[in-house]
Image (cartoon, grey):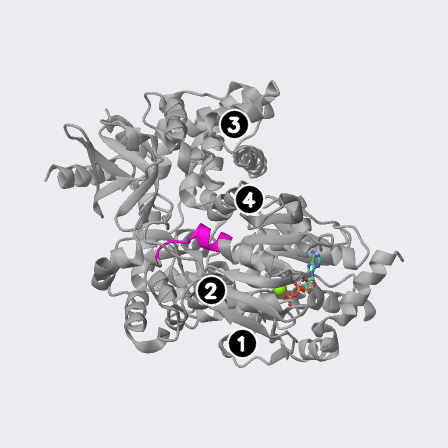
Amino acid sequence: ESAEGQKMQEIRTSLPAHKQKEALLNAISKNQVIVVSGETGCGKTTQLPQYILESEIEAARGALCSIICTQPRRISAMSVAERVAAERGEKLGDSVGYKVRLEGIKGRDTRLLFCTTGILLRRLLLDRSLQGVTHVIVDEIHERGMNEDFLLIVLKELLLHRPELKLILMSATLNAELFSSYFGGAPMIHIPGFTYPVRSYFLENILEMTGYRLSAYNQIDNYGQEKSWKMQKQTLRKRKSQIASAAEDALESADLRDFNPRTRDSLSCWNPDSIGFNLIENVLCYICRKERAGAILVFMTGWDDINSLKDQLQSHPLLGDPSKVLLLACHGSMDSSEQKLIFNKPEEGIRKIVLATNMAETSITINDVVFVVDCGKAKETSYDALNNTPCLLPSWISKASAHQRRGRAGRVQPGECYHLYPKFVYESFAEYQLPELLRTPLQSLCLQIKSLQLGSISEFLSRALQPPEPLSVQNAIEYLKIIGALDDYENLTVLGRNLSVLPVEPKLGKMLILGAIFNCLDPIMTVVAGLSVRDPFLMPFDKKDLAESAKAQFSGRDNSDHLALLRAYDGWKAAERQQSGQEYCWRNFLSPQTLRAIDSLRKQFYYLLRDSGMVDIMEKCNTWSHDEYLIRAIICSGLFPGICSVVNKERSISLKTMEDGPVLLYSNSVNAQEPRIPYPWLVFNEKVKVNSVFLRDSTAVSDSVVLLFGGTVTRGGLDGHLQMLGGYLEFFMK
Ligand code: ADP
Ligand code: MG
């Protein structure tokens, strides 16, 4: 055995889970369901599935067992599988494999499969009783993702029919009782862990220690508003948010009396609605100057602010010698080479700084972290059922999350945690985060319930651990009826059945299907891939005008973000063929990484549609239509009923949707720059509620397109559609 292999075995036996191995296996053999909890990093994910596999092999049942372990994120399914295969001295695809959306490595002898929760749900679609599966392990259940909650309802039912099937639920050290009682008091096993003490500093301490001064103007938030807390006081008071009133009380009370007046003054300029990059930078410099070794883990809200901060830090001398700093990003769409660097210990004298999303809270453990910087927010989708509007906003984390983040600093030695918000804000955090099922639209989920033939949607969801609001359920069902995926009696239509096998949102699936039907798949795959990856157009703060006009050129006179995306992609492909892709991106403010991701997703869509029988002949590729009228029509049909009316005023346009009334466009939409739009409608991809309702990515469409494409393929065919359009027209005439 290699030295590296030996070292890995030593690490394995030193993990806290190792001491509990017998107890765990014993509990599994005696019970159908158990709940395992333990500190992050104690070895649940990498070890427990292996223990089961090893004990089955020892009992000569190796060839019979089939263990499925679900992960909420594709990146963890892949990296854990890779790690476990390495620990076993095997290649991926031998006894250990993985499967994530559109990708996987799995062999004939694979007995332990790591997959995303979505993949297991999809498998249930084809095989309701999970034939041949002996163990299901659902990991990270404390995150309370929608898929996990959904899976638990299905598994609870399945256990009745499959008495020999074992279910193991794994969670960080929170709330194990909740899951245990959902499964009729299943035994709980706790893996005690050891962490070093971590010292916490809140914003007031940080300001006092670093001498950094917040000013009323230096914190520009994500939406370009330059308002400090002080300046917003009036609005805040009106909003009466919990945080705002807590903040006011604390400042006015004596809590902060012991602090330097400068600190108090500075604190009153703090803007709770923004993440201050300069503040983060200053804290990082402060830590680096302390000359204490150890990696720094910074919790940010998402991919976008991680990248912006990374840019700022890289172009800035504050952090000192750039060759002494290893700056890494850790989020759901990083590539695997970057991922390896995250786990590696850097050379002596080099400071590793990892900018991470809340993914690093529990599902990934970076062992050499000594310092944690916590911005206190995470991007979460929440859902406003009354207005039927999903909101994607950075919101305050829970106390449980703050605790997890803090704990990341104490893995190897005593650590330090810098919370970039005042203590009184922490005090006002909720204990736990609201489960996703209660804060997101339920459309895809409802489609799944129907295609799994789980009976009435409402009845099924009422059996959840914490059931969603009936109004949210009704909204989702109504949407599926409007797009033609369900009929009036809530039965799956042909379209609905086809949509449920495509691993994309219903509206995107609908575009793909129509693209295939109308022989227009090539451009439609680009549009759909673009919508499901992320916007490839970059809008650097200081070159916004140039970036906007670059994007506007791609849209031309077509008033469409989607056509702009399509042309930018096609242009990039052409430039790539002449080895000038990089320069093309540079000139047009495009992200090459995003374009590459779109490119690879497109390929995967194609294989998927081919395998599901929706497109047949390979040669068709060459004869695919690029008719822009048709493309626009298919986009319209996918996005319908996401539609708003356009009224051209003298110097501006006004937009209105039926549900929200007046709405605005995000400034990076090509249509936002137009003084007038020569079409009566805009279909949009997404609406987001910030202070007003904003529309992202829109395409202008004519009456006839809305009539024909919003219609024939939606509810009740043309008749029903005319009726509905009548309703829209009537509404806007008023
Ligand atoms: P848990 O699931 O209980 O949080 P894990 O099983 O994920 O713990 O991790 C156990 C240990 O293995 C941790 O110390 C972690 O840092 C280490 N580890 C996990 N994955 C990797 C990897 N890909 N490379 C290096 N170390 C890893
Ligand atoms: Mg884990």
The quadrant of the picture occupied by the C terminus is: top left
Rendered image quadrant of residue 640:
top left
**Labels 2 & 3 near each other (Cβ < 8 A):** no
Callout 1: 10 Å neighbours few (<14), some, many (20+)? many
Q: CA distance from mark 4 to mark 3?
A: 27 Å
For the record, the magenta segment spans 271-281
Residue 375 in the image: x percent, y percent? Answer: 46, 59
Rendered image quadrant of residue 252:
bottom left
Q: Which mark is residue 120?
A: none
Looking at marks 2 and 3 on the same chain, the residue that comes earlier in the sequence is marked by 2
Looking at marks 4 and 3 on the same chain, the residue that comes earlier in the sequence is marked by 4
Element assignment for label 3: helix
Looking at marks 4 and 1 on the same chain, the residue that comes earlier in the sequence is marked by 1
Q: Which residue is mark 2?
A: 206
Q: CA distance from mark 2 to mark 4?
A: 21 Å
Q: Nearer the viewer, mark 4 or mark 1?
A: 4
Looking at marks 1 and 3 on the same chain, the residue that comes earlier in the sequence is marked by 1
Q: Which residue is mark 1?
A: 176
Element assignment for label 4: helix
Along the viewing direction, whichever of 732 and 268 lies nearer the viewer: 268
Element assignment for label 1: helix
Say which amino acid is labelled 2: Ile
Q: Nearer the viewer, mark 4 or mark 3?
A: 4
Q: Which mark is residue 585?
A: 3
Element assignment for label 2: helix
Callout 3: 10 Å neighbours few (<14), some, many (20+)? many
Outermost residue, left direction?
734
Q: Nearer the viewer, mark 1 or mark 3?
A: 3
Looking at the picture, does residue 88 appear above or below residue 166? above
